[in-house]
Amino acid sequence: MPNKCPFCEKGTLRASSREELRYSGGKQILVAGIEYSLCDVCGEESVGSKQARANMRAVADATLSSTGKWTTAQIAEFRDRHGLTQEQAADLLGGGANAFSKYERGEVLPTKAMDLLMRLYDSFAEVRAYVGRGAAPVASVREAWSSAGAGVVSSADSNVFKIGRMKLRPSSLVVANDADWHYEPHSELKYATR
Ligand SMILES: [Zn+2]
C-alpha cells in the first residue's frame, strides 16, 4: 500500500530530495540530498523518522567535510579497519560511552581533538600500542601470543599470561622491554628478539 498523505488523506506521498540551507556548528551550510515526502494531491510536505535520521547524517557529513574532518562513513570505516566495535572505540579513544554510535549517526560531531586522535591511531602502530593498553579482548590476546610461538604457559588466572619470567595482564600488555615484545591491539602481534 502506498504511503497515504496524513494531511488530506487522499493523496500519496512521494519521496524526494533537494538541497537545503541548514544551520550547523553555528553557521549556515548548503546540504545536498535532504529527504522529504510530497503529497501528490494537496502538496503538503512531510519528513518521516527515517528521512529525519538520514537528514541528520547528511547535515553532519556536510559540516564535517567543510571543516576537513572525517565523515560519518569514514569514522565507521576507520573502526572496521581496526576491528573495533563502537563500544571498544569509545573505550579506547574516549568521548563517552555512546560516542561512536552518535558520531556515526551524525548526532554529535567529533571534536577537532577526536578527529586528530582517530587519524593518529589509524596511522601509527606506536599510537595503537600506547592507546590500546589493556583494551584487547583476552581471548584474542591468548591466541596472538600462542600463534607467535612465544611459549605461552596457561595460567590458572585466565587474565594473566606467563611468558618466560614475564607475567602479563590485559592492563599491561605492552611489556616493559618493548624492543623484545611488542603487542599491537586488535590487529597483529609482532614478536621479535634481539
Ligand atoms: Zn495530501
Image (cartoon, rainbow, N blue to C red):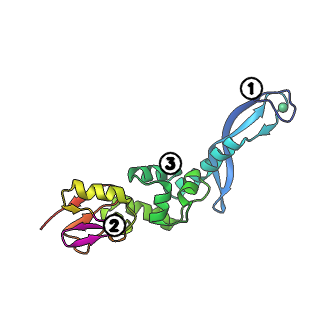
Q: Nearer the viewer, residue 4 or 155?
A: 155
Q: Which residue is mark 3?
A: 73
Magenta span covers which residues?
A: 155-170
Between marks 3 and 2 in the image, the one whose residue lies nearer the viewer: 2
Q: Amino acid at mark 3?
A: Ala
Q: Where is residue 64 shown, x and y percent of the image?
A: 54, 55
Q: Which residue is mark 1?
A: 2
Q: Amino acid at mark 2?
A: Asp
For this orientation, the residue located farthest to the top is 1
Q: Secondary structure at mark 3?
A: helix
Residue drawn at the location 81% of the way across and 32% of the way down: 5
Return the disc, 3 or 2, that comes first in the chain's sequence.
Answer: 3
What whole-number distance in Å separates the C-alpha atoms at marks 2 and 1?
Answer: 60 Å
Residue 178's place in the image compared with 71, above or below, is: below
Residue drawn at the location 33% of the way across and 71% of the way down: 172
Quadrant location, the C terminus? bottom left
For this orientation, the residue located farthest to the bottom is 176
Quadrant location, the N terminus? top right
Q: Which mark is residue 157?
A: 2
